[in-house]
Image (tube, grey):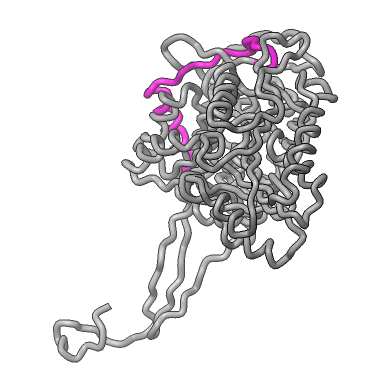
Amino acid sequence: MNIPSKPASIEVEIHGNFVDGREVEAGNGAMLDVRNPATGDVIARIPNSTAEDIDRAMKSARAAFEGKAWGGMDTRARARLINKLADAFEANLDSLYRLETLNNGRPVNETRAQLSRLPDFFRYFAGVALSRRDSVIPVEGAYLNYTLRTPIGVVANCTPFNHPLMILCKSLAVVLATGCVTVVKPSEYTPLTTLKLAQIFSEAGLPPGVFNIVLGLGQNAGKMLAEHGDINKLVLTGGTEAGRIAGSAAAKVFAHQTMELGGKTPVMVFDDFDVDRAVNYAAFGAFIGAGQTCVCASRHIVQASIYDEFVEKLQAKTRAIRVGDPFDPATQMGPVISAKQRDRVLSYVGYGHADGARLVTGGVAAKVPGHDNGYFVEPTVFADVKSDMRIFQEEVFGPFTSVTPFKDEADALRLANDSPFGLAAAIRTRDVARAHRVAASVKAGIVWINDHHRLDPASPWGGVDDSGIGRECGTESFNDHFNTKSVMVATHEQPFDWYRDTANQKRLN
């Protein structure tokens, strides 16, 4: 798909699944529309995969895993190939970030900045593969005990619409570095850059079947993929309920699981921190990606002594955010992904009013000239929010944040931990001891101190409670893509006969 710098019209392309290094026909019914969320226009059509389509992709992946071209490749050759794929990714950045902007509506400045970092994920995990060490374990007696790790096999990966390539690459990089293979089911809203990357990698030399793609609805194609008897690991990023459904299906075939699910990030702002800087982080954390991130700064918990100043300045900052055409370099926030998501965000505005919270700014659909059918929402802030309100407890997944006052550190932690989620949390303070103390006590898998949204391929990423299980990134993710085999070697020449001298044997095992 050729994307001009500011597309006026795009030819509607028909896509199929990607199996064995090429697109193939799939589905047996009506095609699904893929829309540009900034205009509402259909930009592509994709199939809703059948059980036969899923099975074809899985069999292809299994054959690649067991075949010589990929399964027989040695570690150094694989690392060289992965670095070559990173170079190919980098060479195609311009077309990839424009296609991502077209497909998910994030401003072009955001997609360029995010996608430009993704080749690092492949290079990092190629390095981890080269530096991998297995264990020699000291045990009692004349024995050598060591471990062998073997790639876990076929990884089914269900990715969401909010960061299509970034979330894919967090998993894909480690899959390739460990010698596994994958079948990816991207969101039906945003499949285009996933298909494009598969084509780029195939042309760069990735063997057929290593990276397959099945398209379709989550409740159909995603469910069939998760419960397929041939998967060895399920990786899913999405909502908590989707995670429960897919996780239950994968558990039936005893697949390993890594799931990054919903979040309701608390941001604790203490009065020793610069208020203007805290407000700048608040706007970034809450409204980047139109708030459609699992780590969206959706609950600001602010010390009472600076609460009014914080709310006033956040109001001014939020009102200054430029909502508009994602391809306009001046745009700072684009649309949400769909009409359904826009309506969901606006429904939470109603809940906020009904529960007695104070609307500070936003709360309505945004009007963007020339984009009357786009799914735009004004960035929204509610203040005076109590912990029992729906807008405090439930994930909105849009440009929507709340502000709640607290008295002291204990009160801040009580409010922060009053949530079924535990993905990310943030702390704003200049007190070093307090920063570490609060970070240790807050319920979260990721904590930022005086920052937000920071991600690195070497740093583990994931949550607790309703925010999922397992970790992406880092050696934690790398190690979780192997089965570990313990090998015990007797190095002595002592005779052995349990049944000749049973009573005098010192140990059974």
Rendered residue at 52%/39% (across/down): 393
Rendered residue at 62%/36% (across/down): 293
Percent from the top left, x then y, of residue 42? Answer: 62, 10
Rendered residue at 54%/43% (across/down): 387
Rendered residue at 69%/16% (across/down): 38
Percent from the top left, x then y, of residue 197? Answer: 65, 30
- Relative horizontal placement of residue 244, taking residue 324 as reference (left or right): left
- Residue 61 lies in the magenta-colored region: yes
Q: Magenta segment range?
A: 36-65
Percent from the top left, x then y, of residue 467? Answer: 50, 44
Percent from the top left, x then y, of residue 447? Answer: 63, 53
- Residue 283 lies in the magenta-colored region: no
- 261, 458: nearer the viewer: 261
From what the image shows, is residue 450 above or below residue 49? below
- 12, 332: nearer the viewer: 332
Residue 202 in sight from this viewpoint = no
Q: Tell me the quarter of the image containing the N terminus.
A: top right
From what the image shows, is residue 453 above or below residue 319? below
Q: Tell me the quarter of the image containing the C terminus.
A: bottom left
Residue farthest right in this picture = 330
From what the image shows, is residue 15 above or below residue 74? above
Number of numbered discs visible in the structure rendering:
0
- Relative horizontal placement of residue 186, taking residue 333 as reference (left or right): left
Tell me which corner region of the image, top left, top right, bottom left or bottom right, holds residue 412: bottom right
